[in-house]
């Protein structure tokens, strides 16, 4: 039950980024998106992955990797849109 709660939290955390993905990739808008903030969030989530590996917590590892991949897709989209 505890791991289920962890996976549910991870899934919801990843789903929370989908409006940003939609805005950047489908609406082609990047206004208000802070790349430094996104890079800091990716760094923070990377530390969570390391922590999850160290304590052998599968939900922490997988949910943070999924969040990192989602946020990196936003970062790539913003960089492509801002490229002259």
Image: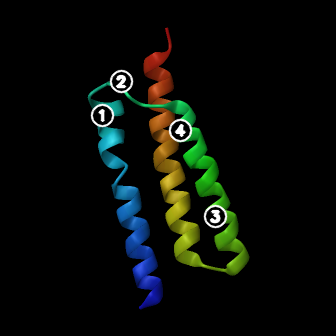
The local secondary structure at tag 3 comes to helix
For the residues marked 1 and 4, what is the alpha-carbon distance in whole angstroms? Answer: 17 Å
- Report the mark closest to the observer, 3 or 4: 4
Q: Position of residue 42 (x, y in %)?
A: 58, 48
Seen in the image, is 72 located left or right of residue 9?
A: right
Residue located at (67% from left, 59% from top): 47
The residue beneath circle 1 is 23
Residue located at (55% from left, 47% from top): 41
Residue located at (59% from left, 39% from top): 39
Q: Residue furthest top?
A: 84
Mark 3 vs 1, N-terminal side: 1
For the residues marked 3 and 2, what is the alpha-carbon distance in whole angstroms? Answer: 29 Å
For the residues marked 3 and 1, what is the alpha-carbon distance in whole angstroms? Answer: 27 Å
For the residues marked 4 and 2, what is the alpha-carbon distance in whole angstroms? Answer: 14 Å
Which label sits on residue 31? Answer: 2
The residue beneath circle 3 is 49
Mark 1 vs 2, N-terminal side: 1
The local secondary structure at tag 4 comes to helix
């Amino acid at each position: 039950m505890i791991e289920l709660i962890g996976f549910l939290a991870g899934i919801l955390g990843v789903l929370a980024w989908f409006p940003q993905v939609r805005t950047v990739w489908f609406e082609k808008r990047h206004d208000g998106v802070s790349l430094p903030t996104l890079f800091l969030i990716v760094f923070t989530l990377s530390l969570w992955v390391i922590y999850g590996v160290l304590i052998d917590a599968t939900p922490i590892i997988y949910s943070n990797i999924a969040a990192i991949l989602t946020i990196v897709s936003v970062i790539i989209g913003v960089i492509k849109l801002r490229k002259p």
